[in-house]
Image (cartoon, rainbow, N blue to C red):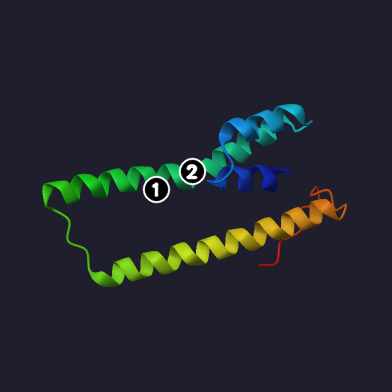
Amino acid sequence: MLLLVTLLRLSPVVPFTFSNYLFGLSSIDLAVLGIGTLVGTLPSQAAYVAAGSLGQKALSGQLQLPPILLVCGVAATILAMVLVGRVAKQTLSNLHSGGGGSQAGPLSI
């Protein structure tokens, strides 16, 4: 269940209000929900902080990035989206097939 909570918190598609309501209706442990929320929101919070810092530098004229950095950033974003999609699909498939998600085995990416 921790992986499911983390993946739902990572997803920008599912609003927090909706997922909070669903988690409230479920029998999920509060500690699992808290840890999953913490881990799942860290990447977006780090991105917001980095974007704010870069925005400040760009507005003040101090930002000079090489074009290869933009290419690498786009490639890393696409790769992350593909990997998260695969893990989410496998997790949902395991839950649907009766795996329960309680096994701590490694996921194949």
Mark number displayed over residue 47: 1
Question: SS at mark 1?
Answer: helix
Residue 79, percent across and down? 51, 67
Residue 28, percent across and down? 75, 33
Quadrant location, the N terminus: top right
Residue behind mark 2: 42
Q: Badge 2, how many Cα within 10 Å: few under 14, some, many 20+?
A: few
- Residue drawn at x 80%, y 47% is 102
Query: Observer-nearest residue: 103 or 75?
Result: 75
Relative to 58, 40 lies left or right = right
Give how far apart the Cα atoms at labels 2 and 1 are: 9 Å
- Residue drawn at x 62%, y 60% is 85
- Residue drawn at x 49%, y 43% is 42
At label 2, which amino acid type do we have?
A: Leu
At label 1, which amino acid type do we have?
A: Ala
Residue 95, percent across and down? 80, 51
Considering only vertical position in the picture, is 38 above or below 100?
Answer: above
For this orientation, the residue located farthest to the left is: 61
- Residue drawn at x 39%, y 66% is 74
Q: Which tag, 2 or 1, sits closer to the chain's start?
A: 2
* Quarter of the figure with residue 38: top right
Residues at circles 2 and 1 in contact by the CB criterion of under 8 Å: no
Residue 101, percent across and down? 79, 49
Considering only vertical position in the picture, is 62 above or below 108?
Answer: above
Question: SS at mark 2?
Answer: helix
Considering only vertical position in the picture, is 93 above or below 22?
Answer: below
Q: Badge 1, how many Cα within 10 Å: few under 14, some, many 20+?
A: few
Question: Viewer-nearest of labels 2 and 1?
Answer: 1
Considering only vertical position in the picture, is 60 above or below 18?
Answer: below
